[in-house]
Image: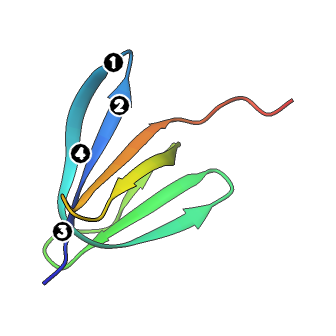
């Protein structure tokens, strides 16, 4: 299985927000994290790094659009 752990990163601090993530839906307002074992979770952020070897996805707050 290839589930990932998703972390919220802000001001240099990482906080795990969901485990066993099997899909991420990208929407204009943010991301929907999907898992086998939990309800989908909406996060108002953006992906800025994915590490496939470590099964980690790093998300940060969305940058304001100009």
Between tags 4 and 2, which lies in front?
Answer: 2
Residue 12 disc label: 1
* Name of the residue lying farthest toward the right: 66
Question: Circle 1: is it few (<14), some (14-19), or many (20+) Cα within 10 Å?
Answer: few
Residue beneath disc 3 = 38
Residue beneath disc 4 = 17
Question: Circle 2: is it few (<14), some (14-19), or many (20+) Cα within 10 Å?
Answer: some
Which residue: 24% across, 30% down? Answer: 14
CA–CA distance in space, label 4 to label 2: 10 Å
Residue beneath disc 2 = 9
Q: Are marks 4 and 2 in contact (CB under 8 Å)?
A: no
Tell me the colour scheme of the image: rainbow
* Name of the residue lying farthest toward the top: 11
Which quadrant holds residue 54?
bottom left
CA–CA distance in space, label 2 to label 3: 21 Å
Q: Depth check: 40 or 23 in front?
A: 23
Q: Position of residue 66 (x, y in %)?
A: 87, 29
Q: Are marks 2 and 1 in contact (CB under 8 Å)?
A: yes
């Amino acid at each position: 299985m290839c589930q990932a752990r998703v972390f919220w990163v802000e001001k240099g601090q990482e906080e795990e927000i969901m485990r066993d993530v099997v899909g991420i839906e990208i929407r204009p307002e943010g991301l929907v994290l999907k898992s086998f074992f939990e309800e989908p979770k909406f996060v108002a952020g953006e992906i800025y790094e994915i590490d496939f070897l470590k099964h980690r996805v790093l998300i940060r707050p969305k940058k304001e659009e100009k």
